[in-house]
Amino acid sequence: MKSEILRLLKREEGYLSGQELCNRLQVSRTAIWKIMNQLKEEGYQIDSVSNRGYHLEKCPDIVTGEELESELEGRVFGHEVYYKEEMDSTNVQAKKLAEQGIANHGYLVTAEKQTNGKGRRGRSWSSPKGTGIWMSLVLKPDISPYNASMLTLVTALAVNRVIREQTGLESYIKWPNDIVVNGKKVCGILTEMSSELDYIHYVVIGIGINVNTKDFPEEISERATSLFIESHKTYKRSRIIEKIMEYLEFYYEQFTLNQDLRLLLTEYNQMLINIENKVVVQEKQTSFEGIAKGINEKGELLVQTEKGIRTVMSGEVSVR
Ligand code: BT5
């Protein structure tokens, strides 16, 4: 009900009368009054005038379920949100909720702070309170498990587009799971999956974005950046989340049509950093050099070497 009240307040340009809220939501005046007080405590500036009603003057920069649900209208991705101020990792929490049958396709988990944010291969992800977006989306795609890793690239495309549109910054995708601005990492994506050989139970797409972060721990300060550091502006995180859900749903639909990236290939390669540049690819045991030529329909990176084109399925790419 709280998200419904927020949604109504956000839509109303003038004042929304208490009586109208009672009628619409079939609750008492006292219930409305209590929720208004809760919202004020969370940082919403609400003007209440007797005989006129309530007017929402300002929203705080928070990522609670109510704030997000009041924004995310009519979409599947993010239609239901699980929020807790502090979590070990939104990916871990999303997996638990999916295992319990609570999180269905499009379920979103958010937190203000992660105490044990995860990167790939056991690495950690710095997730301080209140400055970034730490979220995980649960999907139950009807696709082959072999094709699931492409979801990371689909997500990168959506996040990169939102960053560009919302900030005007020239961000790029660093294959496979980073978004970078001026050569520094502003976003990382961690896709995890529970599957059988031929059937996906669920996929969790974890997205970490440094939004209003002012400084970083020393060990990553040279490689990490934030939207604030690059643009000198602060952003409302719920707005960015809303836009990511919108674009991700759009790109996801295009991906699932053929279970490959043929419809997204041109756009992806335009946004790929280091294309036509000399790169070093670090695979599990070995590394090699070549010129990055872009990705193919399967999301593999094509690298021109002296011996011909090599396709890279997973690995780390750095500039020579
Ligand atoms: C990633 O791993 O880039 C995936 C990060 C995914 C984080 C999200 S937050 C929501 C969800 N819940 C989670 O627990 N995780 C996901 P990888 O490519 O392995 O990069 C990790 C490396 O990036 C670290 O070893 C650091 O060097 C660096 N790093 C750590 N925190 C960072 C930050 N906040 N910004 C930029 N770089 C960071």
Image (cartoon, helix red, strand yellow):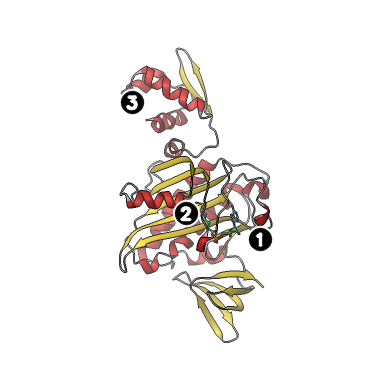
Can you tell which of label 1 and label 3 is closer to the viewer? 1
Amino acid of disc 1: Gly
Relative to residue 163, is residue 20 depicted above or below?
A: above
- Label 1: element kind: loop
Relative to residue 38, is residue 134 depicted above or below?
A: below
Amino acid of disc 3: Leu
Identify the mark at residue 320; answer none if there is no mark.
none
The response on whether ligand 1 sits within 8 Å of label 2 is yes
Looking at the rendering, which quadrant does residue 32 occupy?
A: top left
The residue beneath circle 3 is 25
Residue at x-position 31% and y-position 65%: 196
The residue beneath circle 2 is 206
Residue at x-position 43% and y-position 61%: 151
Q: Nearer the viewer, residue 122 or 71?
A: 122
**Which quadrant is home to the N terminus?**
top left
N-terminal label among 2 and 1: 1
Instruction: Tell me whether the residue at label 2 lies in contact with that at label 1, contact meaning CB atoms closer than 8 angstroms.
Output: no
Amino acid of disc 2: Gly
The residue beneath circle 1 is 183
Q: Can residue 260 be seen here?
A: yes
Badge 2 density bin: few <14, some 14–19, many ≥20, Cα 10 Å = many
Q: Residue furthest top?
A: 51
- Label 2: element kind: strand
Q: Nearer the viewer, residue 274 or 60?
A: 60
Residue 122: x, y in percent? 51, 61
Badge 1 density bin: few <14, some 14–19, many ≥20, Cα 10 Å = some
Residue 259: x, y in percent? 37, 66
